[in-house]
Image: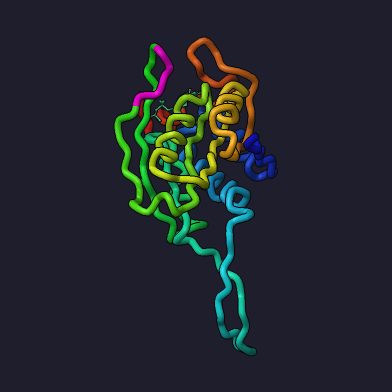
């Protein structure tokens, strides 16, 4: 069974509360999402492999540890997942970035694929799949399946707000994928929106609708 990590750090919770407020505009929403993504990135990367490097301090030579960022990829689910990329890149500047385009059909709430462009050595990288909203879990499950079809074996899902249904679906379909969220909310409403949630993340990031 995949693990669910709820990042309950006070700074993450504080920023998420401001994002939830309906009066928070796109500029602040984007900045807060970027900041939270960087903070959550600490937890998502907590156990990534380090390599030994030989360096010299002003005092003496030593063997020290460094992250091998060339083994990482960040893959946002378009559009809203894009809002988490810059925050992660400020932590992992040499990670490659792929894109998966999915939108939820407004009637069926099922995901529809319209784009996929990934680094060509994606199968050798640990992938952080980003999407702020994990509602029914359909988009995340399809995104993970697309990565697995291309050979990815080490995938982590990083979201902001989840519904219990979405968490359960990912855990059932992809028990090897750990999930990182800042909050698990109460439920979905009749339009498959997360309650209380924060509304439509893509629209709030990009000022559409
Ligand atoms: C939103 C969100 C997720 C998806 C979550 O995207 O960013 O991708 O819905 O819902 P699910 O768990 O029920 O699949 P949306 O389809 O609104 O597209 P957008 O990001 O382009 O606005
Ligand atoms: N997509 C969103 O952007 N918000 C939700 O609450 C559910 C799906």
| Residue 12 locus on image (x, y percent) | 63, 42
| Residue 59 sits above or below residue 118 on the image | below
User: In the depicted view, which residue is nearer to us: 182 or 110?
Assistant: 110
Which quadrant is home to the N terminus?
Answer: top right
| Residue 41 locus on image (x, y percent) | 56, 50
Could you tell me which residue is drawn at 47 percent across and 43 percent down?
84
Q: Does residue 114 appear to the left or right of 83 in the view shown? A: left
Q: Is residue 26 visible?
A: no
| Residue 188 sits above or below residue 50 on the image | above
The stretch drawn in magenta includes residue 181: no
Could you tell me which residue is drawn at 60 percent across and 37 percent down?
181
| Residue 44 sits above or below residue 64 on the image | above
Q: How is the model colour-coded? A: rainbow
Could you tell me which residue is drawn at 58 percent across and 39 percent down?
176
- Magenta-colored segment: predominant secondary structure: loop
Question: Which quarter of the figure has residue 4?
Answer: top right
Q: Residue furthest bottom?
A: 59
User: In the depicted view, which residue is nearer to us: 137 or 35?
Assistant: 137
| Residue 18 sits above or below residue 31 on the image | above
Total numbered circles: 0
Could you tell me which residue is drawn at 62 percent across and 83 percent down?
62
Q: Quadrant of ligand 1?
A: top left
| Residue 58 locus on image (x, y percent) | 60, 88
Question: Which quarter of the figure has residue 166?
Answer: top right
Which quadrant is home to the C terminus?
Answer: top left
Q: Is residue 160 visible?
A: yes
The residue segment tinted magenta is: 108-112
| Residue 135 locus on image (x, y percent) | 53, 24
């Amino acid at each position: 069974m995949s693990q669910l990590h709820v990042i309950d750090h006070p700074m993450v919770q504080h920023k998420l509360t401001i994002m939830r407020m309906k009066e928070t505009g796109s500029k602040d929403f984007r900045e807060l999402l970027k900041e939270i993504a960087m903070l959550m990135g600490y937890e998502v990367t907590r156990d990534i492999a380090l390599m030994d490097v030989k360096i010299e301090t002003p005092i003496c030579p030593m063997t020290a540890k460094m992250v091998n960022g060339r083994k990482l990829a960040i893959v946002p689910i378009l559009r809203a997942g894009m809002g988490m990329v810059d925050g992660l890149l400020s932590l992992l500047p040499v990670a490659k970035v792929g894109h998966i385009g999915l939108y939820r059909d407004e009637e069926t709430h099922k995901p529809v694929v319209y784009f996929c462009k990934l680094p060509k050595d994606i199968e050798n990288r640990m992938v952080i799949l980003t999407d702020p909203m994990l509602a029914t879990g359909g988009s995340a499950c399809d995104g993970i399946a697309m990565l697995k079809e291309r050979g990815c074996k080490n995938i982590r899902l990083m979201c902001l707000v989840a519904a219990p249904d979405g968490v359960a679906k990912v855990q059932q379909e992809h028990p090897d994928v750990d999930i990182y969220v800042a909050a698990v909310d109460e439920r979905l409403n009749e339009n498959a929106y997360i309650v209380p949630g924060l509304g439509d993340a893509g629209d709030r990031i990009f000022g559409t609708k």
